Amino acid sequence: MKQLSGRMRFAAAAAALAGALVSGFTPAGASAAPGSAPRAAVTADEPTEDMPDDGFGDEPVGEQDDFAGSTAEALPASGNAGLRAAPVPGRPGDFQLEAGSSLTGLVNQLDAALPKQGLTELMEQANREAGWDGGCGTAGIYGPDLAVNHRVCWKSDDATSTEWIPQAISGVSDAQEDEDWGSSNAEPIVIGSYDGQNPGRSDYEAGRENCVQTSASDACNEKGVRISFFNQATQKYRHVLLVWPYINSKDNISFDALHAREGKCTSSVTSSCKAQNGIHAGGMVWYGNYLYVADTANGMRVFDLRKIMDLNPDNDADVNDPTPDGLVSDVLDKKRVGRQSNVWYSYGYRYVMPQVATLKFTASRTSGDTSGNQCYATARPKASYISLDRTDTDHMVLGEYCNTNNGGTSPGRVGTYPMTALTAAVEGSPGAIANADAAYGLPTDATFNGEALWHKIQGVTRYEGKWYFHRSNGYDNGRLLQATPTAVDGTTQLVGNAKVLQSSFGPEDLYVVHGRGDGIAPQLWSLSEHAPGSNCSACKRELYSYNMSEVIGDFTS
């Protein structure tokens, strides 16, 4: 069912400046044989504070959502004021990535200790009902400029969760070139969400009174990042918790939820000993066997879809399952994670997927203030969002979220990496380098009602040479922007299209489905992050797609 919207168009106001515009992945892994064992009694927990160096070696700066306390700008009735001023040209060297310390040994130990599950089986066992198209009801979160082609809405607890905030999107069209995955027409889409409550990893152990832990809630623990695989054939989805492998204080392999960098607490969280904020996971690319997850201040975390661990292979949560290492796993206890007192826990999730590699920026951090999401034209960028361009040689696109209202010298930068270089770094030795082959500063001068337009970018993709950006706008319709690399004053710069299209409330990452596997028209997919609430009663969390031909047509008509 196709939800039709009005066809408002914005006239291009900057006519005098218009002349500046130039017009084989096969999941692996098998389940262990089903089995059961009596539920184990839980004694004193094994310490989980003795974490290894995560390969980054410095504290991250947390990325803040731009909508907090903001008021949406008004969209003018016609046109945009101004187009751009020449930005500082991008420097590809600032985007260089280096492989961190090897996790292979740890992952292999975890692989031997726990049963695995292939993605095909996981998709067949997707357990959460989603709504599709008309099943999502009527929603007022979409702008008047684009007709929404498909809509996917979450089960009620995910749609309204104050804990899990959806950010990133990828899928089988990124994973393999022919996009023809499996024989069941599952055509997986994968969504990444971060733990927005982020209470600190030791809050439960510290017994914080202000956090209410119930049997149905795991909100007193910082769980980092989870991903959700959506099966288009069954219209169901399943969550997977991303984890970090480590050797615990008793020299046993274990895992913990994904954090930016572990604190060194030996008992409880204090002002002098606390965990850092969890990563924002603002972008994600599934390519071949690997899932790349953006880590804002550091680079990227990498996961292997051949290493999905199944802590409940008999699908009976009421009975602990034996694990290959002779222990048992418990998927009912939402308060614990990793190996504790000879029992494996996972905050109640059946599936976990451990990090297998780290890619970290090599450039030094800026000396400027970044507390208000300020950005700078040189030094280390932020990995706020990522996507894949398959329209030519496969490239990853990476960019920054910035708020120029708070200062800084740049509205943001974007860079591109050949996927061959990223794959080689992931599979190479520690210190292997992946170089960016292009970088640009964003346009700087276009405005709406006096506010800079080209900042607060939440997602990007490149399609047939043109760049598309999702710009957030508080609790109101976001913006879909377009820019083209153009020769300006002897350098190639991104020149913004004078037209702007209204998008959904809370727009996030972008993902292109080319339709090569089943012959469908190319689609531009995205998602909205805001749950309905006091700040925005009309908000709603959905995945949605536009026909790419209509997006292109709206920017050229």
Image (spheres, helix red, strand yellow):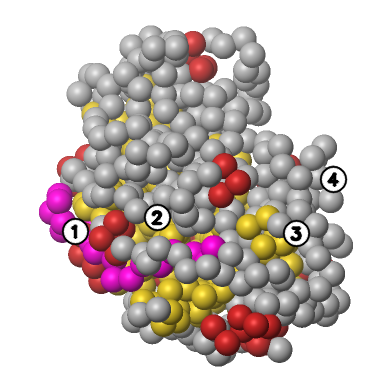
Q: Which residue is label 1 attached to? A: 433
**How much space separates mark 3 and mark 2, taking CA atoms?**
25 Å
Q: Is residue 150 above or below residue 239?
A: below
Q: Amino acid at mark 4?
A: Ser
Q: Please give the label number shown on residue 449.
A: 3
Upstream in the sequence, badge 3 or badge 2?
2
**Label 4 to label 1: alpha-carbon separation:** 47 Å
Q: Which mark is residue 377?
A: 2
Q: Which of disc 3 and disc 1 is earlier in sequence?
A: 1
Residue 428 highlighted magenta (yes or no): yes
Q: Secondary structure at mark 3?
A: loop
Quadrant in which residue 20 is drawn? bottom right
Q: Looking at the image, tell me whether mark 3 or mark 4 is earlier in sequence order.
A: 3
Q: Which residue is rendered at x = 32% and y = 50% of the image? A: 379
Question: What's under tag 3, amino acid-wise?
Answer: Asn
Query: Dot 1 lies on which element?
Result: strand
- Position above or below: 336 against 208: below
Q: Can you tell which of label 3 and label 4 is closer to the viewer?
A: 3
Q: Is residue 108 visible?
A: no
The magenta region covers 426-444
Q: Are the two marked residues, 3 and 2, in contact with CB atoms closer than 8 angstroms?
A: no
Instruction: Give the left or right position of residue 443, taking residue 527 as reference.
Output: left
- Per the image, the residue denoted by label 4 is 537
